[in-house]
Image (tube, rainbow, N blue to C red):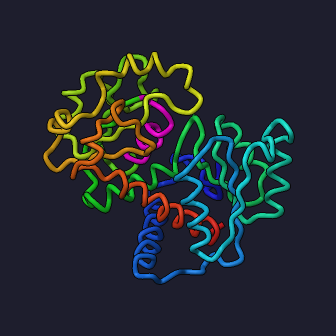
Amino acid sequence: MSERHFLDILDYDRSTINHILQLANQLKSETVKGNWSDCLRHKSLGLLFQKPSMRTRVSFELGMNQLGGTSLVLQNQEIGIGERESVSDIARVLSSYLDIIMIRTFEHSIVTELARYSSVPVINGLSDFSHPCQALADLMTIKELKPNLAGLKLCYIGDGNNVCRSLFHICKLFNISFYHCCPAGFELPDDGVVVSDNIDNALQNADIVYTDVWASMGQEAETAKRLQLFKDFCITSELMAKANSDAVFLHCLPAHRGQEVTHDVMESAQSVVFHQAENRLHAQKGLLVYLLENH
């Protein structure tokens, strides 16, 4: 898919992602200083939601508004994606009104079909396949804390889900070693991933420890089974001590304290999860500017 859209990390090269993050850092610096940019004045963003959201909605809506543009939120009960109206018709109508569209949905095919028929850029705000916006903010956070990326080791502990996939792809682009630790059967099915079910070994020499919920939206029926299978993969202070002494802890949120991570790890000095969450705003501002100024 063309770089006119932002559907998956694999659609972009290292140089382009660096450029987006440079824009994000510049906009973050200006925001901290109170210098508000109106570079997207008169531009409009449509936000389509089939899945509920807090960080995605607030960061995109507020980010667009801070840049001088306007945003419009459309919940699925209002548009009925693929049910009340076809994805292709929705794409053609909305792209005749809007300058850019973000969609947060279940099936990745809905994202790609929307982009195929849209005359304006489409952003994947999350699909069951990937979460590239989260990966942008993750890399932005890692670069701020550990600027020398090459040779870093990131240990992702949890399900091989959309967050895991996008994180692996962005790590691969920037020469960050990616280790996936999970119970058998939950491995990320991508070539080149180092997988282990031994959490002690996986955490050795880790610079970044990352986890996510064990049952994502749409997997509620599997929750009890997953809680049992993943019970030995909860990130505790004792496990964090097996990583490097200066290792940082990341989580894309929301977190289920006491399941995939303990309360004390979430609140520890090593935890940068709220720094990471804030960077969703800045990374997405950089992405909006890039897409609207270059396509």
Task: Look at 70% across and 72% down and name the residue there.
Answer: 43
Q: Position of residue 266 (x, y in %)?
A: 30, 45
Q: Is residue 234 left or right of residue 91?
A: left
**For the stretch drawn in magenta, what is the main secondary structure?**
helix
Which residue occupies 47% across, 83% down? 35
User: Which of the pair 174/267 is nearer the observer?
Assistant: 267
Give the answer, above or below, for where 190 lies relative to 274.
above
**On screen, residue 33 above or below 8:** below
Residue 268 in the figure: left or right of residue 29: left
Q: Quadrant of residue 95?
A: bottom right
Tell which of 131 and 70 is nearer to you: 70
Q: Is residue 151 visible?
A: no
Q: Residue at x 66, y 54 (%)?
A: 102
Is 286 or 213 nearer to us in this picture?
Answer: 213
Q: Which segment is the magenta one?
A: 159-171
Indicate the position of residue 146 as horizontal and vertical percent values: 25, 57
Q: Position of residue 184 (x, y in %)?
A: 37, 17
Q: Which quadrant does the C terminus fall into?
A: bottom right
Q: Please report the residue visible at 56 percent of the width from the left and 33 percent of the height from the top.
A: 217
Quadrant for residue 172, please give it: top left
